[in-house]
Image: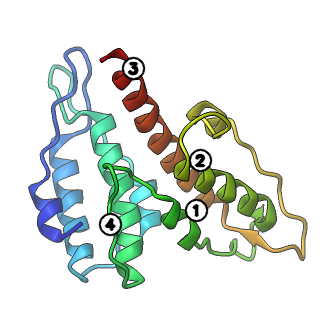
């Protein structure tokens, strides 16, 4: 993803009866994101994943929430890759690839907060990578990932930052939902 890709993105309006995200807020955030892709600004993937947009005013239709969220999920993965100096080759429009999972690194939790056990999260990452590498039975579903729960790591045990892991789980859910939707549409045709 390039700064121009971010600046040129066009989101559809929310369906009738839905307010959607405030257009001015999304556009301003996309400009900040474009600056991050050009190496300016201190926007991190955590900032992107935690950013919340206001709903547009009553009686107006803002940007379709799902389309904005999906774009930001892709931007997080691409920004993380760009900061590591890696180029991403997108396959089939996927938000995540098995290679993304293998390269992923989470931060340790802050000193004053517990994290998720690293070994438990690593097993989950292995299952996600296997699911993305092979379609068919036996893989994780978006419903299963949505209900995943990690324990709290005991003191002294290797752990990952909870917010980062939780935000990543959201990206996995969205990726699997997109693939499940594509499979259903293909089956109908």
Q: Check disc 3 and report the residue beneath it.
A: 187
Circles 3 and 4: CB distance less than 8 Å? no
Quadrant location of residue 120?
bottom right
Mark nearer the viewer, 2 or 1:
2
**Residue found 18% across the figure and 57% down from its top:** 28
Measure the C-alpha gap from mark 3 to mark 1. 35 Å
Quadrant location of residue 18?
top left
Measure the C-alpha gap from mark 2 to mark 1. 21 Å
Precedes in sequence: disc 1 or disc 4: 4
Mark nearer the viewer, 3 or 2:
3
Measure the C-alpha gap from mark 4 to mark 2. 19 Å
Measure the C-alpha gap from mark 3 to mark 2. 19 Å
Q: Check disc 1 and report the residue beneath it.
A: 164
**Residue found 32% across the figure and 49% down from its top:** 92
Q: How is the image coloured?
A: rainbow
Where is residue 171 drawn, in percent x and y?
A: 48, 49
For disc 3, the neighbor class at 10 Å (few under 14, some 14 to 19, many from 20) is: few
- Examine the rendered structure and indicate whether residue 181 appears above or below residue 166: above
Where is residue 31 drawn, in percent x and y?
A: 17, 64
């Amino acid at each position: 993803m390039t700064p121009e890709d971010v600046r040129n993105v066009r989101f559809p309006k929310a369906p009738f009866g839905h307010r959607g995200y405030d257009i001015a807020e999304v556009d301003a955030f996309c400009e900040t994101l474009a600056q991050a892709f050009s190496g300016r600004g201190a926007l991190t993937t955590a900032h992107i994943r935690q950013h919340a947009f206001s709903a547009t005013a009553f009686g107006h239709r803002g940007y379709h929430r799902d389309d904005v969220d999906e774009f930001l999920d892709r931007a997080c993965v691409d920004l993380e890759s760009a900061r590591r100096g890696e180029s991403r080759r997108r396959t089939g429009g996927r938000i995540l690839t098995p290679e993304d999972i293998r390269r992923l690194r989470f931060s340790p939790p802050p000193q004053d907060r517990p994290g998720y056990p690293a070994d438990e999260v690593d097993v989950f990452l292995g299952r996600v990578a296997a699911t993305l590498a092979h379609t068919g039975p036996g893989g994780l579903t978006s419903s299963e990932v949505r209900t995943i729960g990690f324990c709290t790591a005991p003191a002294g045990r290797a752990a990952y930052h909870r917010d980062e892991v939780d935000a990543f789980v959201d990206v996995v859910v969205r990726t699997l939902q997109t693939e499940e939707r594509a499979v259903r549409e293909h089956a109908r045709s």
